[in-house]
Image: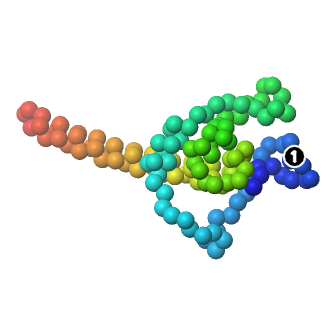
Amino acid sequence: MGLFRRSGKAARTAPEHTETADTAAVAPAGAVNGHQVLETVAALPISTWRYLWEPEQVRHIGPMAQDWHASFDFHHENTRVIPVVDANGIALVCIQALNRRIDELATEVQRLRELTQDGEPGR
C-alpha cells in the first residue's frame, strides 16, 4: 500500500489516500489497549522533515516510517511508508485513551474537593 497516487511511478505531490473500514470489508482481529498504544506513541520519536524533492522551506512533522514500524508491528511489507489508515486509527485510540484519563482525573479531583470541603473547620 502506498501513500502516493500511481501513474507508472510515484507522483511527487502531497500524499493522498483513502481506505475502507466498512464492517462488510474487514475481518476484526482483536481489541486495542488504548493506554498501551498511548504509551507507545509517547515514546515514538517525532521530528520535522521534508521530502527530498520539496523546497528547503517546506516542513512536515511526524515519525519516520522505520520508527513507526518498529513501534507498531502491523506486519506490513513496505516499512518505508506509514499507512494513513493505521495512523488515523492510532490517533483516534490515543484520543480515546486521553479522554478516559481526563475523566478519571476529573473524578479524582471532584472526590478530593469533596473530602477537603467536608473536612474544613467551621463547617
| Residue behind mark 1 | 11
Please indicate, yes or no, whether residue 16 appears anywhere in the rendered image: no
Q: Of residues 11 and 74, which is closer to you in this image?
A: 74
Q: Describe the colour scheme in one phrase.
A: rainbow
Q: Quadrant of the N terminus?
A: bottom right
Q: Crowding at label 1, few (<14), some or many (≥20) Cα neighbours within 10 Å? A: few
- The quarter holding residue 27 reads bottom right
* Residue occupying the far right of the picture: 8
Question: Is 52 situated left or right of 118 in this image?
Answer: right
Which secondary structure, mark 1? loop
Residue 79 place in picture, x, y as percent: 70, 47
* Residue occupying the far bottom of the picture: 24
Residue 6 place in picture, x, y as percent: 86, 53
Q: Quadrant of the C terminus?
A: top left
Question: Is 113 situated left or right of 25 in this image?
Answer: left
Q: Residue at x 64, y 74 (%)?
A: 24
Location of residue 55 with respect to 3 vertically, above or below: above
* Residue occupying the far left of the picture: 122
Please indicate, yes or no, whether residue 75 appears anywhere in the rendered image: yes
Q: Residue at x 82, y 32 (%)?
A: 52
Question: Is 109 situated left or right of 43 in this image?
Answer: left
Q: Residue at x 20, y 43 (%)?
A: 114
- The quarter holding residue 19 reads bottom right
Q: Amino acid at mark 1?
A: Ala
Q: Of residues 83 and 112, which is closer to you in this image?
A: 83
Residue 109 place in picture, x, y as percent: 28, 41
Location of residue 29 with respect to 115 vertically, above or below: below
Q: Of residues 117 and 48, which is closer to you in this image?
A: 48
Q: Residue at x 62, y 39 (%)?
A: 67
Looking at the image, how many numbered discs can be counted on the residues?
Answer: 1
